[in-house]
């Protein structure tokens, strides 16, 4: 996996009660929860498009919102870090996956 192909996204949502849990579970299957409604997802463009389509199908676009913030490539993220005050959560590393 090339670090230039994968981008890091911060994804946050403001969603009504009826689908909030489903959206959270979907985001957890793609990345790491770092706050109650905030996730870090590392994805290639095709994977991000799939995630966006799945979330779009789940939410009510008239009342719910999901923010996708592009933080740059993983290579760029090697030089910057997220800064947290207080209790922080682990963000999954990006070495080789052994199944």
Image (cartoon, grey):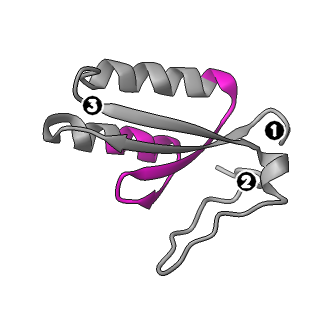
- Regarding mark 3 in the picture, which secondary structure is present there? loop
Q: Earlier in the sequence, mark 3 or mark 1?
A: 1
Q: Is residue 85 above or below residue 67?
A: below
Q: Residues within 10 Å of mark 2 (few under 14, many from 20)?
A: few
**Marks 3,1: beta carbons within 8 A:** no
Residue 51 pos. (x, y %): 49, 27
Chain part drawn in magenta? 24-46
Task: Tell me if residue 43 is in the magenta stretch.
Answer: yes
Residue highlighted by disc 2 = 94
Foreground label between 3 and 1: 3
Q: Is residue 59 left or right of residue 32?
A: left
* Residue at image coords 78%, 60%: 80
Query: Which circle's residue, 1 or 2, is located before the other in the chain?
Result: 1
Left or right placement of residue 72 versus residue 9 in this view: right
Quickly name the residue at label 3.
Answer: 64
Q: Are marks 1 and 2 in contact (CB under 8 Å)?
A: yes
């Amino acid at each position: 996996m090339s670090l230039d192909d994968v981008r890091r996204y911060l994804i946050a949502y403001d969603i009504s009660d009826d689908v909030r849990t489903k959206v959270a579970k979907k985001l957890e299957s793609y990345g790491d929860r770092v706050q109650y409604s905030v996730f870090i997802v590392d994805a290639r463009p095709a994977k991000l498009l799939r995630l966006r389509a799945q979330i779009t199908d789940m939410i009510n676009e008239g009342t719910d919102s999901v923010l996708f913030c592009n933080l740059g490539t993983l290579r760029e993220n090697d030089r910057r870090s997220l800064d947290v005050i207080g209790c922080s959560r682990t963000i999954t590393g990006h070495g080789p996956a052994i199944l």
